[in-house]
Image (cartoon, rainbow, N blue to C red):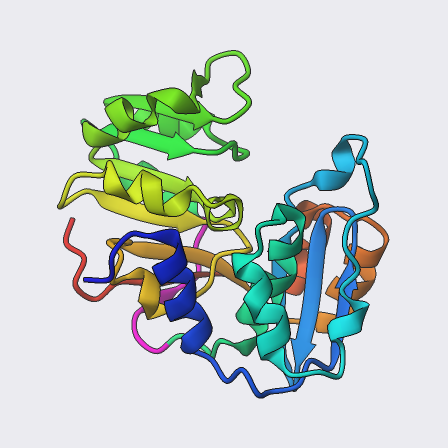
Amino acid sequence: MIPNNMNDILEELIGSVDGASRIDSMVRGRHWIVSRLGKRYGVSSTLDFCRQPLESEPPSCEEYVGGPAIHALRLLKSEHTPERPTGMAVLNAALPSPAGVVTEENAFDILERISPGRSVAVVGHFPGMERLKKAAGECHILELHPTAGDLPSERSPEILARSEVIGLSSTTLLNGTFGSLMKHIRPGSFVALIGPSTPLSPVLFHCGVSLLCGAQIIDGEEVKEASSRGASFREMRRHVQLVNYWNPEAEF
């Protein structure tokens, strides 16, 4: 079992890909960064830093184009949070296609199916949560910036410890909270890591994740163009395939 320490997890992810491969292109938009390594594309949320006034411009990713992937991958461990999405986009482009049980389905359709009569917790806001709330025995949404009906993230230890089905936003890997959240989850719980930024890597299975719900880019040039003009994921959706990569040892 890999310790659920963010530094260790990120080192394992970085070490699982070819850091010598070259970055062919990268585009940073308002919401998404898209990178290309050879024929493969990767995407990451920018954490929407552009939604609020910044003291400085978001970091440029152009300096990494043409260089080895390892230079950008190291940004996953940057102390400057806005730099981390550049590393995640490169990681997602560098990872090979997942080997094992892979399905195409909306992550919340899966959670809805297994949640009746069970306690459910979701870390992060996602569209279409109402059906999950109705299906679950109980359902709590934990948020760093809670709105009506949410619980503050300070209650995560208590809520996660008693939850049987858990959905974590993949941005928890970017904001550094993934490791600490996983420490509060009891053994045997079903844990899904959800969002286009999700690395489809078995490294995360070793951390206790049951299901990786990410995305593979079908038309990279269309996604790059959409990202550069500030498109939302919904606008890019037709150029992206939703992918669910199952932990072969997960039981639920």
Work out whether 227 lies above or below 140: below
Residue at x 52% of width, y 58% of height: 77
Work out whether 26 lies above or below 30: below
Q: In the picture, which quadrant includes the N terminus?
A: bottom left
The answer to whether residue 49 is left or right of residue 88 is right
The answer to whether residue 45 is left or right of residue 7 is right
Q: In the image as oriented, which residue stretches furthest toward the top?
A: 148
Is any atom of residue 165 visible in this view? yes
Residue at x 35% of width, y 22% of height: 140
Work out whether 74 lies above or below 19: above
Q: Position of residue 209 (x, y in %)?
A: 29, 54
* Image quadrant where residue 23 sits: bottom right
* Image quadrant where residue 24 sits: bottom right
Query: What's drawn in magenta, residue-wise?
Result: 99-106
Q: Position of residue 129 (x, y in %)?
A: 46, 29
Residue at x 19% of width, y 42% of height: 189
Q: Nearer the viewer, residue 203 or 135?
A: 203
Does the segment drawn in magenta span residue 162?
no
